[in-house]
Amino acid sequence: MSRISEEQVKHVANLARLAITDEETKKFTEQLDAIIAFAEELNEVDTENVEPTSHVLNMKNVLREDVAKEGLPVEEVVKNAPDHEDGYIRVPSIIE
């Protein structure tokens, strides 16, 4: 017995604004039925002593310590700027 009907597949396709042919409806019905069967098979697996995880593998971020450091001197920052004034970099105006 199929776990999903062709009418349900057509309904979902309609909700997704997809135009599907009768041939595609049959194909998708078979594929979705296989997916549902696999999900039901997974529900039978004993997971009583399995700890929930967000990833299959153990993962950890390798990040450097966030330490505040002194920045570059203002003179060095603005020396390559095409236009600067009083330690600020001037840019073209974008608002009229």
Image (cartoon, rainbow, N blue to C red):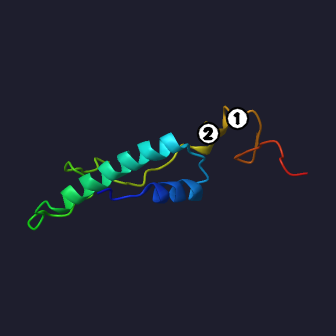
| Vertical relation: 23 (above or below) 60 | above
Q: Quadrant of residue 14?
A: bottom right
Answer with left or right where residue 19 lies relative to residue 2.
right
Q: How crowded is the residue under tag 2: few (<14 C-alpha within 10 Å), some, or many (20+)?
A: few
Q: How crowded is the residue under tag 1: few (<14 C-alpha within 10 Å), some, or many (20+)?
A: few
Q: Amino acid at mark 2?
A: Val
| Vertical relation: 47 (above or below) 10 | below
The mark total stands at 2
Answer with left or right where residue 81 lies relative to residue 43.
right
Q: Tell which residue pokes out farthest to the right in this image.
A: 96
Q: Nearer the viewer, residue 46 or 15?
A: 15
Say the numbered circle drawn on residue 81.
1
- Residue bearing the label numbered 2: 77
| Vertical relation: 11 (above or below) 71 | below
The residue located at (23%, 59%) in the rendering is 40
The residue located at (26%, 54%) in the rendering is 37
Q: Quadrant of residue 76?
A: top right
Q: Secondary structure at mark 2?
A: helix
- Asked whether the beta carbons under mark 2 and mark 1 sit within 8 Å of each other, the answer is yes
Q: Amino acid at mark 1?
A: Ala
Residue 33 position within the rendered picture, expressed as x and y whole percent measured from the top left: 33, 52
Residue 10 position within the rendered picture, expressed as x and y whole percent measured from the top left: 52, 55
Q: Quadrant of the N terminus?
A: bottom left
Say the numbered circle drawn on residue 68.
none
Q: Secondary structure at mark 1?
A: loop
The residue located at (61%, 39%) in the rendering is 77
Q: Nearer the viewer, residue 52 or 16?
A: 16
Q: Nearer the viewer, residue 88 or 60?
A: 60
Q: Nearer the viewer, residue 45 or 60?
A: 45
